[in-house]
Amino acid sequence: MIDYLKGQVAYIEADYAVIEVNDIGYRVFSPNPYALQAMPQPVTVHIHYHTREDATLLFGFESRQQKALFRKFLDVSGIGPKVALGMLSAGKPEKLVAAIQQDNLTYLTKLPGIGKKTAQRIVLDLKDKLDGIGIDLLGGALSSFTLQYEDAPNEPIAEGRAWKEAKDGLKALGYTETELDRAWQVLQHEVNADEQVDQLMKKALQQLFKG
């Protein structure tokens, strides 16, 4: 298993770079091959080793955090290496993490290959699983993705007001009044009086995804 490669960038194409290590050229698919070329040589590229029936592929990243996030994306149903790589090529890791933790589906659906349902799956599957990947810039990025609520999402609010806030947020994501009322018919039997806005949104998205 290859964990990383250290060598010279021999040449680059649109979606990969060739890293020469001990006179062997490794084709490494990268979110931004040109960034590897711009780095001081020799470069250290962190590798995800991917095998399938017809090929063995190397995916390379500038940092271990990028690689860790790439692997998290692969854990989401419906996301393969090509889509995961496209997400990292379109958004900085800290912004991607912030968008997921802030339920920012608008941002996620702007990424290549990510539709509304896939974005919902990403949030549901990864929102509580990203703390350990160690992205130092996450704190600053979160402030730029603040949810547009009058109250902070972690502040406990009365149930009626919390659902109103959550419902307004879900409407902004494109859900209709009818869809949300149908979801609430189920949720009202499952929530507590001190339920928070972000918790209600997550439960509502789970219910909406079920159909």
Image (cartoon, rainbow, N blue to C red):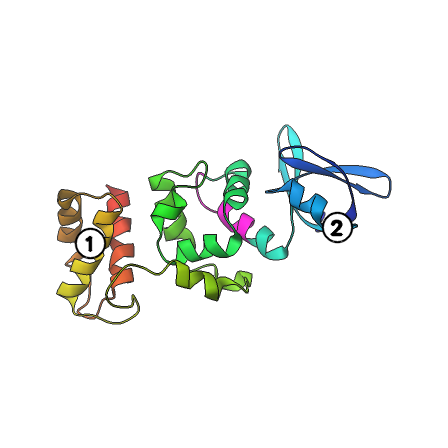
Q: CA distance from mark 2 to mark 1?
A: 48 Å
Query: Mainly helix, strand or loop, the magenta region?
Result: helix
Residue occupying the point 38% across, 51% down: 123
Amino acid type, label 1? Asp
Q: Relative to residue 83, is residue 178 drawn left or right?
A: left
Task: Give how far across and how far down residue 194 sits, in percent.
Answer: 21, 70
Number of numbered discs overlaid on the protein picture:
2
Residue numbers of the magenta segment = 69-78
SS label for mark 1: helix
Task: Give how far across and how far down residue 86 sits, in percent.
Answer: 52, 39
| Residue underneath mark 2 | 43
For label 2, the crowd category at 10 Å Cα-Cα, with few meaning under 14, some 14 to 19 and many 20 or more, is: some
Q: Is residue 41 above or below residue 211?
A: below
Q: Please give the label number shown on residue 168.
A: 1
Residue at the far top in the pictured view? 54
In this view, the residue in front, 58 or 104, is 104
Task: Give how far across and how far down residue 5 sits, in percent.
Answer: 75, 48
Q: Relative to residue 97, is residue 3 drawn left or right?
A: right
Q: Relative to residue 92, is residue 175 drawn left or right?
A: left
Amino acid type, label 2? Val
Q: Give the quadrant of the C terminus.
A: top left
